[in-house]
Image (cartoon, grey):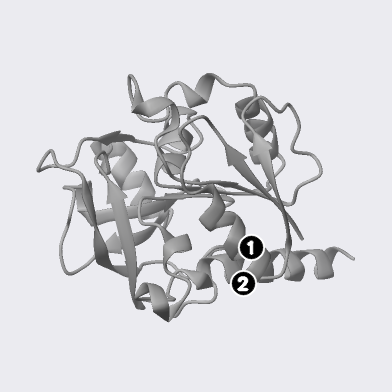
Amino acid sequence: MKFAVVVFPGTSCEVDTYDVIKHKLNEDVEYVSHVSDSLDQYDAILIPGGASYGDAVRPGAIANMQPILKSIKKAAEKGKLILGIGNGFQILLEAGLLPGAMLKNENLKFICKQVQLKVENNNTAYTSAYEKAEQITIPIAHGKGNYFCDEATLAELKSNNQIIFTYTSENPNGSIENIAGITNKQGNILGLMPHPERAVDTLFGSEDGLKIFQSIVRNWRESHATNA
């Protein structure tokens, strides 16, 4: 399996994300620039966290205008797996690949700490390695992670089981319905504010995030074995 780690000016978590794929999963992975115009050779696309373009205007808004987004949207239409973490989630929202918007944290402060999450849906390409309703620990690091959507969108997210992760012990940023991560209707795109690439070893305080990446690989292998 071959992964792409998309890098924008201001991205700061690309090395962590690359390292998980290369050294924890032993899979092929490459950095891909924001000016690249093709992702055809990759099986999964990872959009890491950071603060692309300094979070100017709205987080992810300027990144959405870069050449690589056309390729990301093309990959999404083909059903390829696309994971957006932190700022990557914000970029997917700005691109219209996921519904809703991201607001400033309710307390208007940057928050960096471990949080407790609940796996609401483990029947996805990103969560199949988890148990249903499993409680996990993954860190957050953001100033604008307050997920918001209108009532109609929220109802649709619920009816389609698109709410994948929720905050449990506390809601650190004010997100509606404690939402920490969602997918699109097709389930091939996941956006989440917590950083699973920072929770892949007990030395970091948790290895609960590793299962997201393991789920991606397992799903890809199973789907390709079926199609072979």
Please, is residue 35 above or below residue 199 in the view? Answer: above
Q: Quadrant of residue 216?
A: bottom right
On screen, residue 94 versus residue 152, left or right, reads right
Q: Circle 2 sits in a helix, a strand or a loop, which is it?
A: helix
Image x and y of residue 115, in percent? 25, 65
Label of residue 146 in the image: none
Density class for disc 1 (Cα within 10 Å; few <14, some 14-19, many ≥20) is many
- Residue 135, quarter of picture: bottom left
Q: Are marks 1 and 2 in contact (CB under 8 Å)?
A: yes
Which residue is more in the foreground, 214 or 118? Answer: 214
Relative height, residue 74 to residue 184 (above, below): above
The circle drawn on residue 24 is: 2
User: Residue placed at 59% from the left, 61% from the top?
Assistant: 19
Which residue is rendered at x = 44% and y = 76% of the image?
207
Q: Count how many numbered circles sit on residues in the image.
A: 2
Amino acid found under the numbered disc labelled 2: Lys
Q: Position of residue 215 (x, y in %)?
A: 59, 69
Horizontal side, residue 45 vs residue 53: left or right:
right
Q: Is residue 127 visible?
A: no
Q: Residue at x 61, y 72 (%)?
A: 24
| Residue type beneath disc 1 | Ile
- Tell me, for residue 21, which label it has, or none: 1
Residue 129 seen in the figure: yes
Query: Label 1's element?
Result: helix
Query: Can you say which quadrant of the picture contains the N terminus?
Result: bottom right
Q: Quadrant of the C terminus?
A: bottom right
- Residue name at image x 27 percent, y 43 percent: 145
- Residue 139 figure quarter: bottom left
